[in-house]
Image: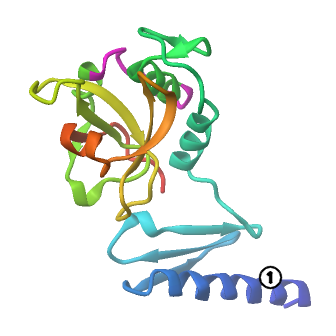
Amino acid sequence: MSKKKISILSFILYIVLNTWCLISYSQLRITKNSDSIIVASNDSINQIVTFSSLKPKVFKADSMIIYGKKYLGLNYKRGGTSNRGYDCSGFTMTVFAKFGIRLPHTSAGQSLIGIEVNSKNIQKGDLIFFKGRSRRGHRVGHVGIVISERGMPVKFIHSSVNDGVREDWMLSDYYRKRFVKVMRVKHWEQ
């Protein structure tokens, strides 16, 4: 084995050990193939970390979030689906379309796509739904995309009527009181 391969393996072992410390609450499974080492916990597919050619893999959900964040600060526009402005469902529709997923242009319509996810399993890439501005109503009236890691407080990106495309926390009073459900349209590679 060459010195270069030994130093690469040493570096990977260092990263694996650091990863293990970060996920110490679960048991790890390590698999090696020709060009990567996969470190996975036994209890969650969301904990998979892949190292290939010493560059961490950018996962599809991460790519979607990076793409969605390019729109931060753009204005809200009712019915909007362009850089002149987005409404909430126009924003999620545009982001998902970039990754080959067609969604209807209403938050209520989007709330019927995919499978419902319980609050313990919310992960990046899920659609999060809220009632409209009236707390008394029961209909879905707003949608965003979850951008936080599974198991962490839920943060999402969306197009807000007052502030345009922005990030918010589900636990804020305004959104906590209006929360309806979370739907997983696609199981993203994590």
Question: Residue 89, percent across and down?
Answer: 39, 21
Specify whether 9 is left or right of 18.
Answer: right
Q: Is residue 34 left or right of residue 112?
A: right
Q: Give the position of the N terminus as an image quadrant.
A: bottom right
Q: What stretch of residues is rendered in magenta?
A: 98-107
- Image point 89% across, 84% down: which residue? 4
Image height check: is 79 above or below 24? above
Q: What residue do we see at 49% from left, 68% from top?
A: 48
Question: Which type of secondary structure does the marked residue at label 1 adopt?
Answer: helix
Q: Position of residue 161 (x, y in %)?
A: 41, 21
Is 127 positioned to the left or the right of 117 in the image? right
Q: Nearer the viewer, residue 122 or 77?
A: 77
Asked where in the image residue 71 lies, by quadrant, the reply is top right
Horizontal relation, residue 182 to residue 89: left or right = left
Q: 92 or 54, which is in the foreground?
A: 92
Residue 32 or 17: which is nearer the viewer? Answer: 17
Classify 37 as above or below 21. Answer: above
Residue 18's x, y, as percent?
A: 60, 85
> Mark 1 highlights which residue?
8
* Vertical placement of residue 156 versus 42, above or below: above
Question: In the image, residue 53 lies at what x, y percent?
Answer: 77, 67
Is residue 75 or residue 99 the one in the foreground? 75
The quarter holding residue 56 reads bottom right
Instruction: In the displayed orientation, state which residue is furthest to the top.
Output: 79
User: For the point 45% across and 69% down, which residue is it?
Assistant: 47
Secondary structure predominantly adopted by residues drawn in magenta: loop
Kind of residue at badge 1: Ile
